[in-house]
Amino acid sequence: EAGVTQFPSHSVIEKGQTVTLRCDPISGHDNLYWYRRVMGKEIKFLLHFVKESKQDESGMPNNRFLAERTGGTYSTLKVQPAELEDSGVYFCASSRHPLTDTQYFGPGTRLTVL
Amino acid sequence: DQQVKQNSPSLSVQEGRISILNCDYTNSMFDYFLWYKKYPAEGPTFLISISSIKDKNEDGRFTVFLNKSAKHLSLHIVPSQPGDSAVYFCAASSGAGSYQLTFGKGTKLSVIP
């Protein structure tokens, strides 16, 4: 069974540009989560999808971040326009059932905003 | 304000000995706790979990202990192996309509051969 995959693995952009991160969850996992780790800090929750619906987006920093999961399969996280403080590692995770099942994490996308 | 705290940024242990990683939490609504292991350039890998209705869960060399009154949990690795060297994250969730994980900052474990 393939794990959670994320693309790209690294992205370097300039302040003001737009970047789109992609996450492909484990097949059959309805629940998809985005997290972010800023350097030196803890991994922080951004949002949670159940299929194509946003279940919880309380962790989204501001309206420069837009997450979508059309069709309930893969998800994208767009940052527009990117700011310096958006630099960090963005992780995606998926699970079958949110309460009883483990969240399995992807390798992350390292975003650097210059 | 950090709701999950791992106060030791790093820990060094001799191969074959016990590794004890500690975690404290402040949110009384947390009822499910997990430990993840992370190697460089990889995502966190699930290790072991415990529900708040239990005080101990064991899986092979890994045991997690939960002390609800002290809001403290610990991960014991016995015996420690060089391949256990990684960053260990403690995480918690409340399951009260939101299944987000709240993570600690991690403890870097080095097992010395």
Image (spheres, coloured by chain):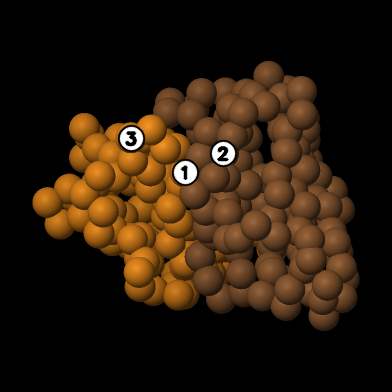
Residue sticking out furthest to the top = A28
Identify the residue at image location x=82%, y=80%: A114
Give me the disc on residue B100.
1
Position in image of residue B92 (x %, y %): 38, 47
A93 above or below B81? above
Number of labels in the image equals 3
Position in image of residue A49 (x %, y %): 60, 33
Q: Give the crowd class for mark 3: few <14, some 14-19, many >=20 residues within 10 Å.
A: few
Whether labels 3 and 1 share one chain = yes
Identify the residue at image location x=56%, y=39%: A48
Residue sticking out furthest to the left = B69
Is residue B60 found left or right of B71 in the rendered image?
right
Q: Chain of mark 1?
A: B
Q: Chain of mark 2?
A: A
**Which amino acid lies under the numbered mark 3 shown in the image of this protein?**
Ala
Q: Nearer the viewer, residue A44 or B33?
A: A44
Position in image of residue B80 (x %, y %): 47, 57
Whether labels 3 and 2 share one chain = no
**Which amino acid lies under the numbered mark 2 shown in the image of this protein?**
His
A54 above or below B73? above
Mark 1 in CB contact with mark 2 (< 8 angstroms): yes
Real-space Cα distance between discs 3 and 2?
A: 14 Å
Identify the residue at image location x=57%, y=23%: A96
Q: Chain of mark 3?
A: B
Say which chain is orange. B
For label 2, the residue is A48
Q: State the quadrant of the N terminus of chain A.
A: top right
Is residue A19 visible in the rendered image? The answer is: yes
